[in-house]
Amino acid sequence: MIGRADALAALERDEYDVLVIGGGITGAGVALDAASRGYSVALVEKADYASGTSSRSSKLVHGGLRYLQNFDLGLVREALLERQLMVKLAPHLVRPLPLLIPAFDGRRPDRITGVGLNMYDVMTREGLRRRRGVDEEWSPERHRTIDAEETVRLLPALAAKKPSAAYLFYDCQTDDVRLVLTALGEAERFGAVCCNSVEVTGLIERRSRAAGALCTDAVGGGEFELRAANVVNATGVWADRLRPDELHDEAEVPRIRPSRGTHMTVSTEDLPVVAGAIVPAGSGRSIFVLPWLGRTLIGTTDNDYEGSLDHIPPSETDVDYLLAVVNDYCGTSLAGGDLTGAYAGVRPLISTGDPKKSVDISRKAELYETSSGMVTITGGKLTTWRRMAKMAVDRIVEREGREAPCRTHEIPLGMPADPSELPEVDGVDEVSRAALAGRYGHAALDVLTLASHSPELAARVSPELPDLVAEAAFAARREQTRSVADVMLRRTRLGLLDARRLTEPGSEGAAAVARAMAPELGWDDAEVAAQLEGWRRVAAVEGLVPGT
């Protein structure tokens, strides 16, 4: 990405066709879609890219098997189409993941579940037939029943419970933040200008129509007007906080009803899984247990949330609930002290006033244009980000009478790299090279070049995980990163995967990250110390280490 100072100067100087407010996956998608259609685009994010919901998902790119229970076939079909497309456009970022639904006590897997999986298979193949003539792409095998031995091989954590069989099917998994950063990088390639730590405090109007925004630079403190012919509000769960009177006073604008989802991670030694598992949680609910970036990820809850949106820690009740479900199902005795990290986020579910639980509220995207001409896009889910972006830009194209079809279905997201073809660097093993290829694609070469400059940069941040100290320097130089917390939570995911170790006083891993960033950002020893203290404060208010 271009440097933040250069981006900020361009935003203050130039006028744009489209201003996108919000640097999560939806905003990144709108920026890419609009820029690739020939619009000049500016994007601003009040905090760090993907610092809201887009970094706090279940990391799945999936059709949503549970939505079949509500016969929401349209949502599932749309999501399955997008899943197929994402594997094709970003094969290093969106990868197939086997998922199991086990059975016990000599029983065969539930037949009703099998009917749902049959529908999943059929809708997947319908999508592939509709895309006939497209280059070869990943096609999941039909679901099948596997025996006890294969079930235990894929889910070693269940060995003591002696499963008798399981359904095996496929969805996909991603690093949600890296998907956002990659989409933003592609948007920049088409000319978009993106800048984080820029907060929109109001709209600029000309003849009662939105013509840009009044912005505050959260780093330098200055205010400026960002001029744009069209404004897209892609702030997710914060969408109704920008011009709330305008949004809520106009007809047929639904309310956003935040729902908190809590997740936690544990060591693969404590809960070993090779594939994911769908675990029944009572009352018709289920949770996921998934392998993710060297840990086992457990989640999620889905409860109405009415607290502050600035920092959303996991609730103690949710953590206890997830631990109880997993311990009962797997026969384990995991406790809060075994967690390597935890996180929570809020989903922008759309409420129409029905007092149902949020889990039953629509996950469909909602787009509405209010009297100022501002276009707001919210709701939806991670998997359908590209469709949501298309909806928003289609509205702008339609009202301007342009001929500018969507192109994002054919634009690759990043450039994959074969780990075996990456250069060898002293101190960097094969596991770390593979992790770099999966995170950065071809840009892993640039990270390895940095790592080759010193043994300190080639070292791991945490001994159990493959992330390199060089990634912190790369993030500061190339990804508008301003803090140790940015690196821990969003450029790597170590703040979710090894929070307990990295928040300890005197943590060498955290100190190594700060030292790597210092020459890139001009930090002296005092600022390095302040950054480490700031990281520990963020970890505390985000509840990354439950019980501390």
Image (cartoon, helix red, strand yellow):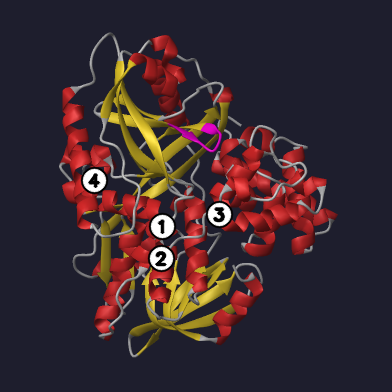
- The mark nearer the N terminus, 2 or 1, is 1
Dot 2, how many residues are within 10 Å of its Cα: few (below 14), some (14-19), or many (20+)?
Answer: some
Question: Alpha carbon of mark 2 to alpha carbon of mark 1: how far?
Answer: 7 Å
User: Which amino acid type corresponds to the residue marked 3 in the rendered image?
Assistant: Gly
Circle 4: residue type: Thr
User: Disc 2 vs disc 3: Cβ atoms closer than 8 Å?
Assistant: no
Q: Position of residue 287 (x, y in %)?
A: 36, 31
The disc label shown at residue 124, or none: 4
Residue bearing the label numbered 2 = 411
Q: Which of marks 3 and 4 is nearer the N terminus?
A: 4
Indicate the amino acid at tag 2.
Ile
SS at circle 3:
helix
Please, is residue 121 above or below residue 524 in the view? above
The question of residue 488 being in magenta is answered with no
Residue at left offset 26%, top offset 32%: 143
State the mark number for residue 441.
3
Instruction: Answer with mark 1 or mark 3, whichever residue precedes in sequence.
Output: 1
Look at the numbered disc 2 and give the secondary structure of its residue: loop
Q: Vertical placement of 256 versus 167: above or below?
A: below
- For the magenta stretch, what is the residue range? 290-295
Estimate the x, y position of residue 179 in percent, counting from the top left: 47, 55
Q: In which quarter of the image is the N terminus?
A: bottom right
Q: Which residue is drawn at 64% across and 70% down?
A: 3
Distance from Cα at disc 4 to Cα at disc 1: 17 Å
